[in-house]
Image (cartoon, rainbow, N blue to C red):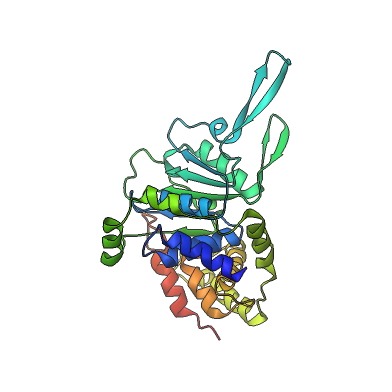
Amino acid sequence: MKDTLSQALAEIDQVLLGKQHAVRLAVACLLARGHLLIEDLPGMGKTTLSQALARVMGLGYQRIQFTSDLLPGDILGTSVFDRNTAQFIFHPGPVFAELVLADEINRATPKSQSALLEAMEEGQVTIDGATRPLPEPFFVIATQNPVSQGGTFPLPESQLDRFLMRLSLGYPSPAAEKSLLMGAERQERLERVLPALPRDKLLALQAAVPKITASEAIVDYILRLVNRTRDSQVCAWGLSPRASLGLLAAARAWAMLEHRDYVIPEDVQAVLPAVVSHRLRASEDPAGHGGGGLAQWLLNEVEAV
């Protein structure tokens, strides 16, 4: 299993050059059974990352382009009347895939956003009174542009909280960008990606993540981090219990990527910015630009002892 994970990471790194830490966080999010929000400028590799993850793990992939006229039925599917059988036949929507890319999620109306987020939370959809389970594994990568806000519907805090992690890929280093320019096109790189982590092994790893040992000291450390956001006037509000559960799950997944069966404080510190930045807001931040800086403040405030 360790070699398989390392091979999967290496395959993705060949496509997304110079973004090893972001790739590891994305894989940790998948292992922890969470969902990922990527907030970045266009052309930074958000779609490439989702396609590489799907290929290296052999997952069924669907991309949904969120627009202002997107309807919940376009995501979940619809029932169509069949004259031959005189019955309604359900035609599943793109959400019935193992890896779903929700591109520019903040360009759809809140009603369509809620349809996807409900599916993420419940792992199933209910249409026409019938409940239909989503596939296993089920992983959503949503993207949004942080700059152009014209004609967008920003996700409220309650919906942001449903994403385990938020990442920003950022610009590549000069060396990585030179390799990108000198090498093959991204699509050609994607076609070279080999399935390294079959679906059955991925499910086994996901089932093993909760069994990674987290000592009482680690749990206390997470509680101190969470409570510091609740009793400080720096934060507009504190982290929720869902955030503390997510932080523990992400730290366990990170420990697995480090080939350990136990969590250490460095695992918590490695995933904390991605887990809490979209859940926090500074008290003196009326524009609501998020808590990217608060994550580092929190790590500096609370000692891992």
Q: Residue at x 32, y 45 (%)?
A: 148
| Viewer-closest of 256 and 17 | 17
Number of on-image labels: 0
> Which residue is depicted at the point 60% across and 77% down?
260
Residue 190 visible somewhere in the drawing:
yes
Tell me which corner region of the image, top left, top right, bottom left or bottom right, holds residue 88: top right
Query: Quadrant location of the C terminus?
Result: bottom right
Can you tell which quarter of the image residue 82 is in? top right
Provide residue 237's location: percent of width, then percent of height: 50, 63
Q: Is residue 2 above or below residue 146?
A: below
Q: Is residue 280 visible?
A: no
Above or below, 282 against 103 in this view is: below
Horizontal side, residue 85 vs residue 297: left or right = right
Q: Position of residue 163 (x, y in %)?
A: 53, 55
Quadrant position of the N terminus in the picture? bottom right
Where residue 101 sits: x, y (%)?
49, 45
Q: Which residue is nearer to you in this view: 136 or 177?
A: 177
Residue positioned most to the bottom = 305
For residue 91, above or below residue 97: above
Where residue 27 appears, x then y in whole percent? 53, 61
